[in-house]
Image (cartoon, helix red, strand yellow):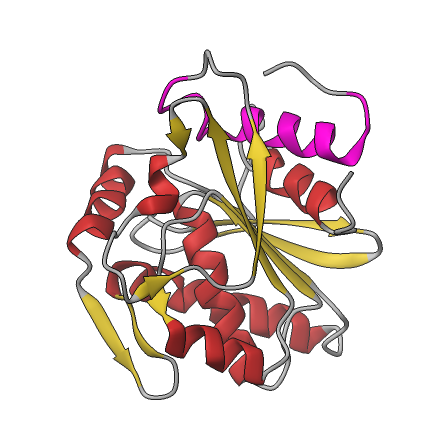
Amino acid sequence: MTADPWLLPLADAAAACYADGGVPWFQNPAKTCHVFKSIVAGHPCYAFEGTSSFREWMIDFMALEVPWFAHPEAGPVHLGFWLDIQDAVAAIAADLTGIGWPSYLVTGHSKGAGESVLACLQLSMLGHPPLATRSYEPPTVGTALLTDCLAGWKADVGWTKTCNATGADIVTQVPDWPEWVHQGVETRLQVPDAYGIAEKHQMPAVRAAVQALAGVGVDVP
């Protein structure tokens, strides 16, 4: 049973991005970054959606090549994701400013998980780190310098990695440069051995594994 109180509620928030008929609270002009807003445990929650179009698949693909931005404090970070979140972070900051900057939450899945880590960084550097950030099946988006920068802000960051007999979710293993690492506490999630590369990455399998870890009723993906 997981001791992380945010893992399941933020998995639910991340999963809600994919609900039929869902409309993003925010979408950037290029339509490559979608943020859904909800209330989780009384806190505003901003969830970054994963890949949902060919254009976004191209951004995902660029994770393998890792064009990077030299952040002045956090070191090299994924350029595509960094550019993707700029308007979203501005929208989130404006929203929170309008309600007096209460405690808030950030989450995301896949590409959105990588974006959530960088959004956590940027929002923390505004002086308001999220209460918690949970990233589900993210690629790596930076190095130990990013880890240290987030730790300096005492950011509560965690991420998941699904695994079965064929190994770990491949998305969590790119880019495979040794200096690129994940940020925060890793939670390893067991999924059925029958799941292939795509299925064990998708949010229904992730959410079911989180539910099993939390000891609650499991929705079969």
Which residue ends up furthest to the front in the rendered image? Answer: 165
Q: Is residue 197 magenta?
A: yes
Residue displayed at 78% across by 59% down: 43
The quadrant in which residue 29 appears is: bottom left
Residue displayed at 33% across by 45% down: 173
Q: Position of residue 120 (x, y in %)?
A: 53, 68
Residue displayed at 27% across by 61% down: 178
| Residue 87 horizontal side relative to residue 120, left or right | left
Q: Position of residue 204 (x, y in %)?
A: 57, 25
- Residue 48 seen in the figure: no
| Residue 150 horizontal side relative to residue 181, left or right | right
Q: Nearer the viewer, residue 129 or 199?
A: 199
Taking 144 as reference, is 164 above or below it?
above
The quadrant in which residue 206 appears is: top right
Viewport quadrant of the N terminus:
top right
Viewport quadrant of the C terminus:
top right
Q: Position of residue 123 (x, y in %)?
A: 54, 75
Taking 140 as reference, is 31 above or below it?
above
Q: Nearer the viewer, residue 154 or 90?
A: 154
Residue displayed at 57% across by 73% down: 93
Q: Position of residue 212 (x, y in %)?
A: 72, 27
| Residue 218 horizontal side relative to residue 156, left or right | right
Q: Which residues are magenta?
A: 196-217
Q: How many marks?
A: 0
The quadrant in which residue 181 appears is: bottom left
| Residue 156 horizontal side relative to residue 181, left or right | right
- Residue 213 seen in the figure: yes
Q: Is residue 49 magenta?
A: no
